[in-house]
Amino acid sequence: RLLCPCRQPHHAACSGLFSQQTMAALLPAELHQDYMDQQREQIRAEEFAKANNMLNQIAERLQQALPGISQEMLERQLREAIPGARQCGGCGFGPVEHYACENLTTHHQERRAPGSRVNNACP
């Protein structure tokens, strides 16, 4: 429903709203279609906001009930995105992908080219 632009709170004769039927009768077809599309978009936006709010409330309750769930989800996502990646047990740096050798100490300080060495130390 659309508010009447002439509506005044003290004017008893004006209902203050145009019905859908009145809108369809008064507006050109294209303008009425635009109006209806915007009405539907508004309804979708309101429903999305309600659903999003509900999901946020559920997430908050889950976070309170299971405090580590966000960390667990992140770890699972990283495991799926970068299979075989590791995190340093000493400093927490990571994820690190082992692409040539799984043992970082095997080649640590190994000379590769004149003046260069492999450095697998913590950053």
Image (spheres, grey):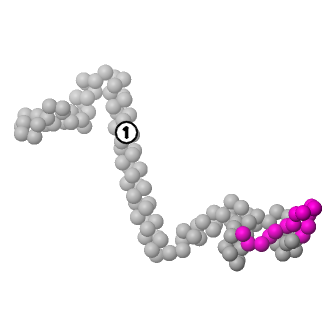
Residue under label 1: 40
Is 14 on the left or on the right of 20, as rendered?
Answer: left
Q: Position of residue 41 (x, y in %)?
A: 39, 40
Is residue 40 visible to the viewer in this orientation of the structure? yes
Residue lying farthest to the bottom in this orientation = 90
**Residue found 7% across the figure and 36% down from its top:** 11
Residue lying farthest to the front in this orientation = 115
Residue 114 on the magenta span: yes
**Of the pair 101 and 26, the residue shown nearer to us:** 101
Q: Residues within 10 Å of mark 1 (few under 14, many from 20)?
A: few
**Residue found 6% across the figure and 39% down from its top:** 10
Q: Position of residue 50 (x, y in %)?
A: 37, 54
**Of the pair 104 and 73, the residue shown nearer to us:** 104
Region rendered in magenta: 110-123
Is residue 103 visible to the viewer in this orientation of the structure? no
Is 23 on the left or on the right of 119, as rendered?
Answer: left
Residue lying farthest to the right in this orientation = 114
User: The C terminus is located in which quarter?
Assistant: bottom right
User: The N terminus is located in which quarter?
Assistant: top left
The secondary structure that most of the magenta stretch takes on is loop
Of the residues shown, which amino acid type is indicated by label 1?
Arg
Residue 85 on the magenta span: no
Residue lying farthest to the top in this orientation = 28
Q: Position of residue 14 (x, y in %)?
A: 11, 34
Which of the 4 image quadrants contains residue 68?
bottom right
Is 27 on the left or on the right of 72, as rendered?
Answer: left
Which of the 4 image quadrants contains residue 100?
bottom right
Q: Position of residue 36 (x, y in %)?
A: 34, 33
**Residue found 46% across the figure and 75% down from its top:** 65
Secondary structure under tag 1 reads helix
Which of the 4 image quadrants contains residue 18?
top left
**Residue found 42% across the figure and 56% down from its top:** 52
